[in-house]
Image (cartoon, rainbow, N blue to C red):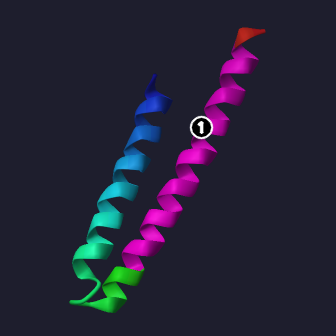
């Protein structure tokens, strides 16, 4: 259960970062690029953690 919470947290971070990209795009382009990086890393971490959790659940089933 704890791993699912972290997965969801990474998705929340990605959504908030995407919102900040749109909010900052015309104000501060460098800051927007930083939030793009945060969003991409968060999505990557979501999929990485999900794969790790599923692998762990399969190992614990046996």
Residue 3 counted in the magenta span: no
* Side of 19 relative to 36 (left or right): left
| Along the line of sight, the residue nearer the viewer: 55 or 18 | 18
In the image as oriented, which residue stretches furthest toward the top? Answer: 62
| Residue 25 position in % (x across, y down) | 29, 84
Residue 49 counted in the magenta span: yes
Looking at the rendering, which quadrant does residue 51 occupy? top right
Looking at the rendering, which quadrant does residue 15 occupy? bottom left
What residue is rendered at 24% in x and 89% in y? Answer: 26
Q: Is residue 18 above or below residue 12?
A: below
* Side of 36 relative to 12 (left or right): right
Name the residue carrying label 1: 50
In the image as oriented, which residue stretches furthest toward the right? Answer: 62
| Residue 44 position in % (x across, y down) | 58, 56
| Residues drawn in magenta | 34-60
What is the crowding at mark 1: few (fewer than 14 residues within 10 Å), some, or many (at least 20)? Answer: some
Q: Is residue 2 above or below residue 25?
A: above
| Residue 7 position in % (x across, y down) | 47, 40
For the C terminus, the quadrant is top right
Q: Secondary structure at mark 1?
A: helix
């Amino acid at each position: 259960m704890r791993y699912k919470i972290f997965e969801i947290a990474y998705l929340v971070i990605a959504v908030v970062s995407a919102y900040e990209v749109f909010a900052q795009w015309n104000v501060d382009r460098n800051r927007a690029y930083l939030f793009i990086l945060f969003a991409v890393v968060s999505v990557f971490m979501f999929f990485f953690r999900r794969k790790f959790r599923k692998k762990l659940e399969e190992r614990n089933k046996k």
